[in-house]
Amino acid sequence: MRLFIAAYLPDEVERHFAAMVGTLAVARPMPEGRSLRLVPAEQRHMTLAFIGDVEDERRDDAVEVLEALPQIVPRARIGGGGRFGRGKFTTLVAKVDGDVAPLGDAVRKLLKKRRLPFDHRPLQPHVTIARPGDRLPGADLAADLDVLRAYEGPEWLVDDVRLMKSEPGPRPTYEVLATTRDAKQG
C-alpha cells in the first residue's frame, strides 16, 4: 500500500482558500482531454512525510507514528505560491508559512524509529493546487502565480494530522487510515 502523513486544512481555511483558487485560470473548466488536474478540495493537504509503498502488514507501524506523535500544534497560514517543475511536469502550489518544521521533524523521527521508509528531501510546506503540466498557456500560468504570490489566508492550528493511503492515477483516491484525533481519543 502507498502511504503518506499529512496535515489537513480546517473547513474555514479551506473555504477561504477555495474562493481564491476559484479565481485562477487553472480552475476553469477545460474541454475533454485538456484537464489541468485540479486537486479536489477534499484532497488538499500539506504533506509532512511521504512514506511510499510498504507491505500491508506495516500499516500498524505507521498508525503507531500518529499515536506516538508529541503534542506539537504549530500555527500555519497559506501565503504565497509558486510552482515545482517546468513544462509537462509543472505543479502549481500554495506555500504554507508558519512553524511546521518541528511537526514534520517529529513525524520523520518516528518513521525512522519504526524503520519505515520516507522521502528524505527537506520539508517544503505547501498545498498542491493543480498539475497543469504544459497545458496551461504561459500568460495564464503567470497570472495565476501573481494571484498566489499576493494571497494570504487565515491562520490556523495544525491539529489534524492523518495517515493516508493513496491510489495514484489520473484521478488519485485517498483513504484515511488514522488521525491524531483518533489517537487522542484512543
Image (cartoon, grey):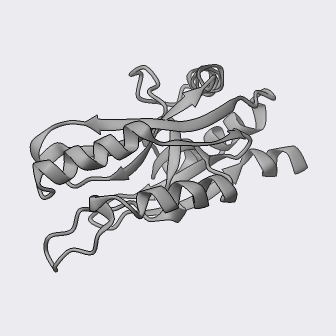
Residue 23 sits in quarter: bottom left
Towards the viewer: 105 or 76: 76
How far across and how far down the image is residue 157, in percent? 73, 38
Q: Residue at x 41, y 64 (%)?
A: 22
Horizontal side, residue 135 vs residue 73: left or right: left
Q: How many marks?
A: 0
**Relative height, residue 8 to residue 30 (above, below):** above
Q: Is residue 133 visible?
A: no
How far across and how far down the image is residue 83, in percent? 28, 38
Q: Residue at x 42, y 39 (%)?
A: 150
How far across and how far down the image is residue 93, in percent? 37, 43
Towards the viewer: 39 or 28: 28
**Relative height, residue 79 to residue 19 (above, below):** above
Q: Residue furthest right?
A: 185
How far across and how far down the image is residue 86, in percent? 14, 38
Horizontal side, residue 31 vs residue 112: left or right: left
Horizontal side, residue 44 vs residue 163: left or right: left
Q: Residue at x 86, y 44 (%)?
A: 184
Residue 39 sits in quarter: bottom left
Q: Is residue 181 visible?
A: yes
Q: Residue furthest bottom?
A: 32
Q: Residue at x 26, y 53 (%)?
A: 131
